[in-house]
Structures are given as structure tokens and as C-alpha cells.
Image (cartoon, helix red, strand yellow):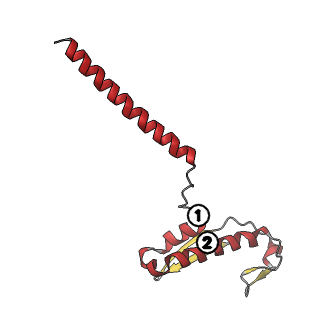
Amino acid sequence: MYMRITLNREKAEMRLNIELADTDLLKWDETMMRFADRNMSANAYLNEIDKNFEEFRYHNATKLSNYNAKTVRDLVIGLNAKPTPLIIQYIDKYHDRLFHQMHRWLMEQKEITERLLNI
């Protein structure tokens, strides 16, 4: 199963991670664009993609010209998704930066002290 995004006469396609048996293809409802069997995991995946696309359209309706079809596809599928940083990551980054600044300052002070003692 493939997904196609078209925007400004550009298109971007991608194979979706949905495995289907030949019998599943008979359950496809072209009107609903879903499988007739509501419990199929493929429907849940398609619903998630649809939800992501609608959210994208809602948040970017006035600035679609900033995007191309491939970017929209990647955003909808989640290929560009950056993980939400955890607070511990901010704390670690702060401590690392503070440690390096303190270490650099101490080394400068040590160097100044050694120069003064050698005078």
C-alpha cells in the first residue's frame, strides 16, 4: 500500500508499512478509503496518518507555500519527528556546560597563578 501527497503539482509517494494478504484486498472500501473490517490494524495506521495530515493542514493552512510535497509526506509520516526532550536531558546539558565552563576557568586561574609564581 502506498501513500501519495500532491502539492503545487509536485508529488511524493511512499510505501506504507502495511502488509496485506490477497483476501484483505477484497475488504477495501473505496468510498471510505478504509478496509471493511474495522478491527484491521491497517485501518488504525491509516487513521493515524489521516489525523497527522489534518493536523498539519490545520496548523499550516496559511503557509503551505513554505512546504513541498516531500516535506509534507515526511512530516505526516513522522520521518522528521524529533523526539520530545526530557527534562533530565536539559539538566544534563546544563551541568555539562557548567562543568566545562568551570573547568576552563580553573585552568585559566592555574595558568595565571603559575605565571605569577615564576616572576
The quadrant in which the C terminus is found is top left
Nearest the camera: 13 or 68?
68
Kindly identify which residue carries mark 2: 52
Mark 1 / mark 2, whichever is N-terminal: 2
Closest to the observer, 78 or 96: 96
Quarter where residue 42 is shown: bottom right
Tell whether 65 sits left or right of 111. Answer: right
Disc 2 element: helix
Given residues 110 and 4, the one toward you in this image is: 110
Q: Secondary structure at mark 1?
A: loop
Residue marked by disc 1: 78
Do the residues under discs 1 and 2 have CB atoms within 8 angstroms? yes
Q: Residue at x 74, y 66 (%)?
A: 19
Q: Which mark is residue 29?
A: none
Q: CA distance from mark 1 to mark 2?
A: 9 Å
Above or below residue 14? Residue 11 is: below
**Viewer-proximal residue among 16 and 92:** 92
Image coordinates of residue 25 in percent, x first then y, are 78, 76
Q: Mark 1 belongs to which amino acid? A: Gly
